[in-house]
Image: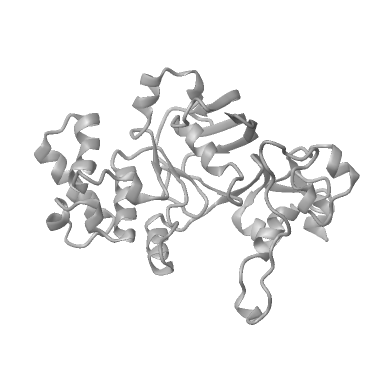
Amino acid sequence: MSIIDKTAAVPAPRGGDHTGPLLEVRDLHVEFHTRDGVAKAVNGVNYSVNAGETLAVLGESGSGKSVTAQAIMGILDMPPGKIPQGEILFRGEDMLKMSEEERRKIRGRKIAMIFQDALSSLNPVLTVGYQLGEMFRVHHGMSKKDAKVKAIELMDKVKIPAAKARVSDYPHQFSGGMRQRIMIAMALALEPDLIIADEPTTALDVTVQAQVMDLLAELQQEIAVMYAGRIVEQAPVHELYKRPAHPYTRGLLDSIPRLDQKGQELYAIKGLPPNLLKVPTGCAFNPRCPKADDLCRTEIPALVPVTEQNGADLPGRKSACHFWKETIHG
């Protein structure tokens, strides 16, 4: 099992005949056609996830993280959404070329998603047991009785107390943390190869966040940072925290409150994310970047490999910044 998330992780890989990446996104573009113009939400995203890997995607609201996830799942509203170019390869097959019926066979069974708002994602008029059991009734043809047994097993798996007694309760009868556990249980139900978690701890208090994170194994391996619909940096998690190679990544890390700076003013990246109807020319981050010059305002930086000062490779590291050397080695 593998996962795409901004914060979480998973256990070991499952089997399969495909030897390449489990998921590969190539030059993905997503647009939204509005009365005011075309909003370019995703602008040439590229990343891959191997079996057993975790890829955490970071960025401010509006960076394109959720839109990318929805495009992979095939749940974008089209129109107004449109995918003018790109490929989404799952086990080597381009899902954008599949029929809706073919994609439905993949959703849930091969790729599952944990949404950030459990209350609005669960049906309020159906019991949680019915909703969990539906996965087994639809995909495995189980009887209602057997599906209920599997639902209780899943609720136990995600540590919902008194699962047998609560399987007939409705979503509103559970706390926010328990509802999120139910969403995780639904994602795990059919043992998918890939789980996409779209901010699964949003709106939960810090204690419940920690519990949900524990449930998702806390083993992040790689991070991709998005800005204005593009991947601007990729790196193994510890390397990125230690030495960011993009000014935006450094700004995000500097924005995290620190216990050793009590009473001091919190750092914030100046300005706001760009209007996707009018993305700045050159590097989209240039109006907010302290290192920006004329090159940044005219030329879009490519996502290139990052190396040590002596030229030695830094495995898994890439940056889309004209001044990545000064950022990582400065």
Relative image position of residue 22 (x, y in whole percent): 49, 34
Q: Is residue 67 left or right of residue 236?
A: left
Of residue 181 and residue 290, the one placed in the foreground of this image is: 290
Q: Residue at x 72, y 39 (%)?
A: 279
Quarter in which the N terminus is drawn: top left
Is residue 326 placed above or below 41 in the rendered structure?
Answer: below
Relative image position of residue 284 (x, y in whole percent): 74, 43
Q: Residue at x 49, y 18 (%)?
A: 97
How many numbered markers are drawn? 0
Relative image position of residue 64 (x, y in whole percent): 59, 41
Relative image position of residue 151 (x, y in whole percent): 19, 46
Q: Is residue 188 left or right of residue 167?
A: right
* Residue most extreme to the left: 145
Q: Is residue 94 visible?
A: no
Of residue 159 and residue 100, the one placed in the foreground of this image is: 100
Q: Residue at x 47, y 54 (%)?
A: 8
* Residue most extreme to the front: 35
Of residue 8 and residue 126, the one placed in the foreground of this image is: 126
Residue 217: which quarter of the image?
Answer: bottom left
Is residue 323 placed above or below 82 in the rendered structure?
Answer: below
Of residue 287 and residue 167, the one placed in the foreground of this image is: 287
* Residue most extreme to the right: 294
Q: How is the image coloured?
A: one colour
Q: Is residue 134 visible?
A: yes
Residue 210: which quarter of the image?
Answer: bottom left
Is residue 55 placed above or below 26 in the rendered structure?
Answer: below
Quarter in which the C terminus is drawn: bottom right
